[in-house]
Image (cartoon, rainbow, N blue to C red):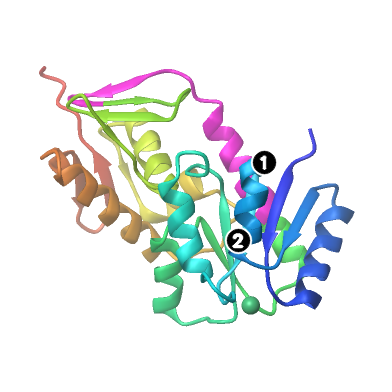
Amino acid sequence: MQKKILVIEDEVDIRKMIAFALESDDYQVIAVEDGNAARQVINESIPDLMLIDWMLPGISGLELVRGFRRSAATRTVPIIMLTARSEENDRIDGLDSGADDYITKPFSTRELLSRISALLRRAEDFEGATQTLQAGEIILNPASHELTIGGKPVNPGPTEYRLLLFLMQHPNRVYSRSQLLDYVWGEDIYIEERTVDVHVLRLRKLLRQFSVDNMLQTVRGSGYRFSISTSQ
Ligand code: CA
């Protein structure tokens, strides 16, 4: 089925260039110039992926991403941020706001298309998981994307969600940052290993609210492990 991509970019030339490239690659494209127009589109139907420019008039791209992540309808929609800013801190801010990937202008359409297809493939891989997982008080239902800890509903960001899902599927094993990048982010995604640490910290902070953060262990010099006691 044709995937629908919502592009939010105020610069008309870039917007047209992206729309043309995506349509040529057989995506359905809706390209808008700001957050208000994007919200109207989303009210009618949820896209399969969003490309969001950082610097937008009115509501910034970063604020938009945060808003989309808070809303149940758009929480799991993959997001790539477009930006002219290549500073490390900006990149971390972008991912921290809930974006899944980040692409710096100027970029080639080939690079953009490869990032999009990697992200869509990854989203599909995770949608394929249906078996409810339990680790102590943590219960995750991949079919409905519902996570509860101690019976309380929890709403992690999409990357934290996938990270937790992967770790719950593969407990008590140590994974290096580069392995987690391959398994959770996807092999075609070129992001730095530090990104893994950012999302592990965020997931741990969430687990800490329920005093179960001790399950997500740092293995010095090796990586991370999700530890489930087998003596229960
Ligand atoms: Ca802009």
Q: Is residue 124 magenta?
A: yes
Q: Earlier in the sequence, mark 2 or mark 1?
A: 2
State the image coordinates of residue 230 (x, y, percent, origin top left).
16, 21
Amino acid type of the residue tagged 2 in the rendering? Asn
Question: Which residue is rendered at x = 46% and y = 82% of the image?
Answer: 87
Which quadrant would the N terminus be assigned to in this image? top right
Q: Position of residue 104 (x, y in %)?
A: 60, 75
Q: Which mark is residue 36?
A: 2
Q: Which residues are magenta?
A: 116-138
Q: What label does residue 44 carry, if any?
A: 1
At x 76% / y 54%, what residue is drawn? 30
Residue type, label 1: Glu
Residue at 45 percent of width and 65 percent of height: 63
Task: Look at 81% across and 61% down and name the residue there.
Answer: 19
Return the x and y of residue 155 as percentages of the image width and height. 34, 40
- Give the CA distance from mark 2 to mark 1: 13 Å
